[in-house]
Image: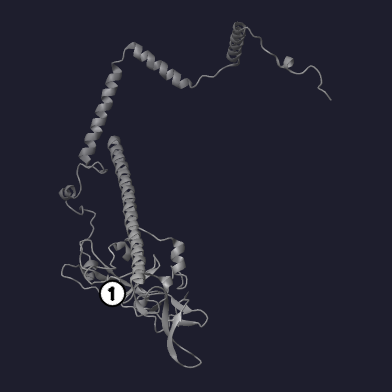
Amino acid sequence: MQKLVKRAAQAQRQAARRSRQQMEQENIDYRMRNRTALRSAVAEVRQNLKDARRARQEDWEMGPLAPKRDLGFNNYGAFRENVRQDWSNYGLHQARPQVVEQRCAWAGGVKQLNLAPQDRVVIMDGPDKGKIDRIKSVQAENGTVTLETHHRALAVGMFESPARSQAMPISIGSIRLVYPIRNPETGVTRDVVINQLKAVPPNMKSENMTLDRWEHGNKWDRLVPGINVVIPWPEVEAPEYEAMPADTVREQVEDRTFYYSLLSPPMPEQVVDELRNKYSRFRTRHEPWYVEQKEAEEEARKGQMEAAKSMQTPLDEFHEMQREIRDSQGEPELTDEMLERIGRVMAKKKAAALDDAGVTEVSAQSSSPSGPGPQ
């Protein structure tokens, strides 16, 4: 049985090592593909900038004779790299934490970002500067958002499909929240651009605090520092799940249909061999008859070894007896007499070696100076 246990343990170690090596290789492949995709996207952005500079120069020099580039059927200005829609590349690339924190600093930081879908924001940079739009989705891990109407671009598929308008991610640092606030002095309510937000503990008695928001939304309130005005969150709608005929409803899941019994196995023994590999190397539990068979084989092997010992010659028995005596005595120890004899032999050999070389030994007294040195 010890052999079976060792075989199962070795198989588990080998499988774990192969799995670890496979995961490491997959991570390397993911990083290589991610690097290639990012390089292609950056190269496309640089090429677009170069083409824009050349077109601007031609328009300046040629004036009315400049060519019309946006013809409607030549996909002018469209991009082909899908990474530009999601620079995280489906989670394979992570922006530096310092950059993400800098983008989200005005909105309360990454951990408690005070922005949500359906918030009205104003664009601060780019060709759509000054336009107001609503947030479609928030990517807090990258510090970007997508808008519903503005900041879009034409995308072309890999099979030369017609160009379609796609929402492009925009940095959170390039937008600001817009919310109507009433002026206490004039009593006029108008849209105000909010440049800073702060997360505060929630007011559980507020009308904006609902059960849907507590379960599916943010559990803190957002405050405008300086004026102490709480900006309510957009209304949170609970997701609705439609049960299909093939789905298992909650009542069926909670209904108990199996009861354990100590008198009978949970399934027939024949079914166990169908569910698992009967001859697997990872198997650690075996049938009683198989265990008895392996133990009988082990006893037979030990009997063969005893039979081989009974056929020893007198010389083999003598050698075995000597080994047992040496093992019982332990390591030998050198006595003072033996050390003295070893020293005499070493001195004799040293003197003979010096005579053969024709040199004499210099003593410590002769090497020291005879008198005091100069004062």
Q: Say which amino acid is labelled 1.
A: Pro
Residue 209 visible = yes
Q: In which quarter of the image is the N terminus?
A: top left
Q: Label 1's element?
A: loop
**Residue 241 at x, y percent in the picture:** 24, 73
182 with respect to 287 (left or right): right
Location of mark 1 (residue): 239
**Residue 37 at x, y percent in the picture:** 32, 57
Picture residue at 35% right of the left edge, 14% below the top: 317
10 Å neighbourhood of mark 1: few (<14), some, or many (≥20)?
few
Front residue of this view, candidates 208 and 40: 40
Residue furthest toward the bottom? 186
Q: Exactly how many numbered labels are in the figure?
A: 1
Picture residue at 58% right of the left edge, 16% below the top: 335
Establish if 338 lies above or below 127.
above
Establish if 363 lies above or below 190.
above
**Residue 360 at x, y percent in the picture:** 66, 9
**Residue 293 at x, y percent in the picture:** 21, 35
Establish if 260 lies above or below 240.
above
Q: In which quarter of the image is the C terminus?
A: top right
Residue 91 visible = no
Front residue of this view, candidates 180 and 286: 180
51 with respect to 231 (left or right): left
132 with respect to 269 (left or right): right
Front residue of this view, candidates 65 and 306: 65
Picture residue at 31% right of the left edge, 75% below the top: 64
